[in-house]
């Protein structure tokens, strides 16, 4: 799986958008970009994933550059409860319905949302 | 839905003792994962089951670790004998099917080996 690079930490004011970057310059055409987060003392939680197109769900938006070498996770209106470690993961997706899709977690970005 | 259930939530034991961690995946999920998280190594995949069969155990550190999944609703991770370096938080996760998009994680078991 391609390696990802994320900033170690970021700050964001409550109510503002949090934009978390991720570099995955060696990503392959069959690899998805996944984002998980881990709030202190809890298990990781899935946020969103995408292949080529931008994606949006009730939690966040994912913007993937046209060359797919980087992406940005956007939390549109950050709250104090969004303080967590955010993991950007590249995961291979295989055809045939028997995909394993192993997740390899890096160190992630510690996002601190302050009042 | 109760989510992934793990027990115990905390375990303190002495070096050399056997430790058994338990996991109940979400009903209907047929993929199960065991992870270990430490400050030094982060979150590491230990083993992955699909339809109760171990598919990838390349992350299991050594023979002291073993994992079983006797049925679709129960899995165990056993450490025998335990060592202080096994101290970590152990997470279990399940997924609806092989290749499914999202893994659901349990709350974890914090293991301390003295």
Image (cartoon, coloured by chain):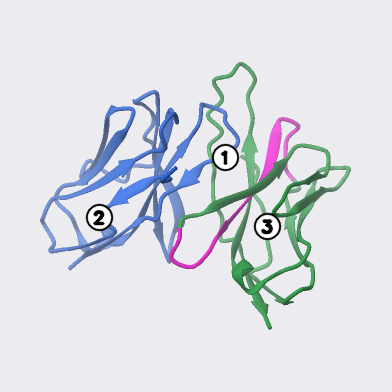
Chain colours: A green, B blue
Q: Secondary structure at mark 1?
A: loop
Work out which quarter of the rendered image holds the N terminus of chain A and state it: top right
Q: What residue span does the magenta drawing correspond to?
A: A26-42
Q: Nearer the viewer, residue A58 or B103?
A: A58
Q: Is residue B103 magenta?
A: no
**Horizontal arrangement in the rendering, residue A90 relative to residue A65 (left or right):** left
- Residue at 41% across, 39% down: B33
Work out which quarter of the rendered image holds the C terminus of chain A and state it: bottom right
Instruction: Return the residue at label 3.
Output: A5
Pointer 2 and pointer 1 on the same chain: yes
User: How far across and how far down the image is residue A4, in percent?
Assistant: 66, 52
User: How far across and how far down the image is residue A55, in percent?
Assistant: 79, 44
Instruction: Return the residue at label 1.
Output: B102
Mark pair 3, 1: CA separation: 22 Å
- Residue at 13% across, 61% down: B15
User: How far across and how far down the image is residue A7, in percent?
Assistant: 68, 66
Chain of the residue under the numbered disc 2 shown in the image:
B
Nearest-to-viewer mark from 3 and 2: 2
Chain of the residue under the numbered disc 1 shown in the image:
B
Instruction: Return the residue at label 2.
Output: B8
- Name the outermost residue toward the bottom: A115
């Amino acid at each position: 799986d391609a390696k990802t690079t994320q900033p170690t930490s970021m700050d964001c004011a409550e109510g503002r958008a949090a934009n978390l970057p991720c570099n995955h310059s060696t990503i392959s055409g069959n690899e998805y970009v996944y984002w998980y987060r881990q709030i202190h003392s809890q298990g990781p939680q899935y946020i969103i994933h995408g292949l080529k197109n931008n994606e949006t769900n009730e939690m966040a938006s994912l913007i993937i550059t046209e060359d797919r070498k980087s992406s940005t996770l956007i939390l549109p209106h950050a709250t104090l409860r969004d303080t967590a470690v955010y993991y950007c993961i590249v995961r291979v997706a295989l055809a045939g319905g028997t995909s394993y899709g192993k997740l390899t977690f890096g160190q992630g970005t510690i996002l601190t949302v302050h009042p | 839905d109760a989510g992934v259930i793990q027990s115990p939530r905390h375990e303190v034991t002495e070096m050399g003792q056997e430790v058994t961690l338990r996991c109940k995946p979400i009903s209907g999920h047929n993929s199960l994962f065991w992870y270990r998280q430490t400050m030094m190594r982060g979150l590491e995949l230990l083993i992955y089951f699909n339809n109760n069969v171990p598919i990838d155990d390349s992350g299991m550190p050594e023979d002291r670790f073993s994992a079983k999944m006797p049925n679709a609703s129960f899995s165990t991770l056993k450490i025998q004998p335990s060592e202080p370096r096994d101290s970590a938080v152990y997470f279990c996760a399940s997924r609806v099917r092989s290749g499914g998009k999202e893994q659901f994680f349990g709350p974890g078991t914090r293991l301390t080996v003295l």
